[in-house]
Amino acid sequence: MLKAKQVDGIIIFPTGGNPDLYKRMKKENFPIVFMDRTIPELEIATVMLDNHLAAKLAIDHFVEKGYKDIAIVTTSIIRNISPRVERIEGYKSSLLSHGISPSENYIKTADIEKISQALSELFNLTQPPKAILAGNDIVLNEVLQYIKKENLRIPQDLAVIGIDEVSFAKLYTPTITTIKQPTVQMANLAAELLFNQINKTDKFDTSIHRLKPILLLGTSC
């Protein structure tokens, strides 16, 4: 529809379900830039968070505070959405760097309507986690709702860090530690890459640009 309206280019948050469409657009030299997610084999200019570093910042902070039983909960990875997969990879590698063996029991991925069930499974383990890394803002909201329903205390019963800054993080009691994406810089870079394609400048590239996250400290950990 957008192409029919003769737009000059599109910034796309790609899903795993449209590779043929993206290939066709690239073959037609239609200006596109991927945002937040990547499909490496297509070699399309991409702007995204350094997701491995985002997970590392969280795990490093948990460990610094004395936590070892650390879980990660994220939305479904069935469609191989790159931020979700990379954050789990970063979680595993960061634990290993601290001498902690990742437990598959502490890794939960599910569609949003099943996150509460996944959390119940975590807390029914013989040794439930003492800390949770919420893989995105949607999951963080589900985690906080579950904590309230179960009358758990943060951080006494459970420490929490969320990837993606949320508006209520500083208003919640206790304040929530989050990993912030540099969203303005990411948007500016995506626009610049797209304009370079539209204007056919010499700066045209098909690189994957990863921007660094920032740890915003709260009192939830």
Image: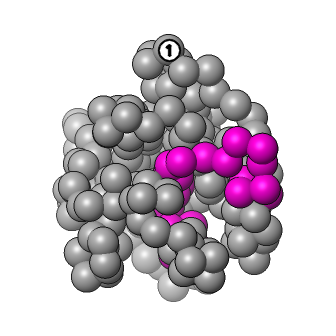
Quick one: SS at disc 1? Answer: loop
Q: Which residue is identified by label 1? A: 99
Residue drawn 42% across the image and 59% down it = 156
- Residue 110 visible here: no
- Horizontal and vertical percent position of residue 100: 54, 21
Q: How many marks?
A: 1
Pick the front one: 80 or 122:
122
Residue drawn 43% across the image and 76% down it = 7
The amino acid sitting under disc 1 is: Gly
Horizontal side of residue 125 vs 38, given as left or right: right
Pick the front one: 43 or 220:
220
- Horizontal and vertical percent position of residue 72: 59, 47
Pick the front one: 48 or 122:
122
Please rate how many residues cluster around mark 1, counting C-alpha atoms within 10 Å: few if below 14, some from 14 to 19, many from 20: few
Residue drawn 27% across the image and 70% down it = 175
Q: Residue 74, located in which quarter of the rendered image? A: bottom right
- Horizontal and vertical percent position of residue 25: 60, 55
Q: Is residue 144 magenta?
A: no
Residue drawn 23% across the image and 48% down it = 214
